[in-house]
Image (spheres, grey):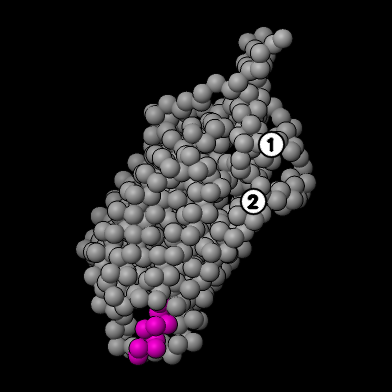
Amino acid sequence: MDEKRTAPVETVRLSSCMWLGGADCMITTLNNIITGGGLTYFFVNHLGMSPASSALCWLLFGLWNALNDPLFGYLSDKTKSVLGRRIPYIRYGSILVALVFILSWTLWFPTRTNSALFIQMFLSLFLFDSLYTAIATSLYVMPFEMAVTNRARGKIMLVKLIFGLLALAVPLVLLAELENLLGSSEAAFRRLMLVIGAAAGAIMFFSTFFYKENGYTKEEEQYPFFRSLITCLKNKSFLVFESISFSVTFIQTALMMGLSYYFDAFGINYLFCYGAMFLGILFGIWLWMKPGAIWKVKKSIILMCLIFGGTLAVMLILGRYTAAGVIGFFGAGIGFAGGMYEVPLMFGDVMDYDEKLCGLRREGMYAGVNSLICKPAISFANALFPIMLGWFGYNTALGVAAQSATAKLGVRVAWLAIPIALLLLCAALIARFYPLGGVEWDRTKEELALRHEEKQRAYESEMLGR
């Protein structure tokens, strides 16, 4: 009797993790600078474009931004390049996206008329986001191409998390200094953007020589576009996953929006809170990597939602005190680490389950549909915060510190109430409806790892025989 084969222990080289994390950090940094307020400030505050034209530009861009994700995801699934399905977009897209980023800060027309500025800003956004989507989608799903087990994927996610902190910090510092940088020397500012763009493009380009994807996947015939889209939406585990993915996107946007309001309204020293958040991130990395490996993804996500939501609730109720703020920010750090580490692992399981159902690897389409669903969360967060402030009588003619006690309470409610509700709802939905967990799912993952190994070996043998 033949012995039952077991999947080999998956290993991913640290150099591959580092290069992938570095490339992801670079494209995220460029995007955070462009869409995080940098391009709008440059065109409106510095070049003199009208705010109304800027708003129209973002509105028109938003329509394309919402639709291009499933399209690029599907195209990458269908790609049959000798380099693979994802790597061509990263390698060659890196050159183009760096060029577009650099040129976005250089005037394309001889005059600074409002119409000329509108055309340039719109085209900059259109071209940059098209390239960003193609590259970022490929980088996002690459860990699921490189490994199947969550142990191996977790190593990649940890490195990406560390680089993710850099991708957040650099744009925050740069955007805070935009006025000074542009005021002192526009030429020097453009040189800085040139260096950032060129460095990012080079790192993304060279990173593609240090990781690889399974060759057999490009030989598989994918579903037509609409069938592929519909089967994603029929995947129950994916729909449950979208609850936490949408919520994390909303919460990240909402929490960033309310920071200055909170500190100003209650006179809280932000250094204590930021220090607590940093400690929470460090603790969260340990928590989700060590005990989380025993609890597995489903239980870890539920616990993350409860810790994150619970500590934010403390800040909602007692947030006028520094101690409560410290507790809330510590919990936010744990939640941030979980969002960067556990949520992608959950997404990987969802796509593994899809492979069990249809026999195909369709990471690109899933990543695109996920973006399509989650991007409106950014708009909702931006719209709801000022609306909720108005419910509590917030007076925009006064400074934050001068608001009434009711309006200051409204700052906490507008900032924290919806994130808390979303986190608790996610915990309930995942506990009740998410099917991927337990011994049976572990066996399925092992079977998939064996299947990948066999398919890749057969593909390599066929290539050698040609």
Q: Is residue 283 above or below residue 389?
A: above
Q: Is residue 404 left or right of residue 381?
A: left
- Magenta highlight range: 404-412
Q: Nearer the viewer, residue 407 or 400?
A: 407
* Residue 413 rendering spot, x and y as whole percentages: 44, 78
The residue depicted at 29 percent of the width and 50 percent of the height is 191
Q: Nearer the viewer, residue 266 or 204?
A: 266
In the structure shown, which secondary structural element does the residue marked by tag 1 occupy?
helix
What residue occupies the far left of the structure in this picture?
184
- Per the image, the residue denoted by label 1 is 355
Looking at the rendered image, the quarter that the C terminus falls into is top right
- Per the image, the residue denoted by label 2 is 434
* 337 within the magenta span: no
Tell me the amino acid under the disc marked 1: Glu
In the structure shown, which secondary structural element does the residue marked by tag 2 occupy?
loop
* Residue 320 rendering spot, x and y as whole percentages: 31, 78
The residue depicted at 26 percent of the width and 67 percent of the height is 270
The residue depicted at 60 percent of the width and 20 percent of the height is 6
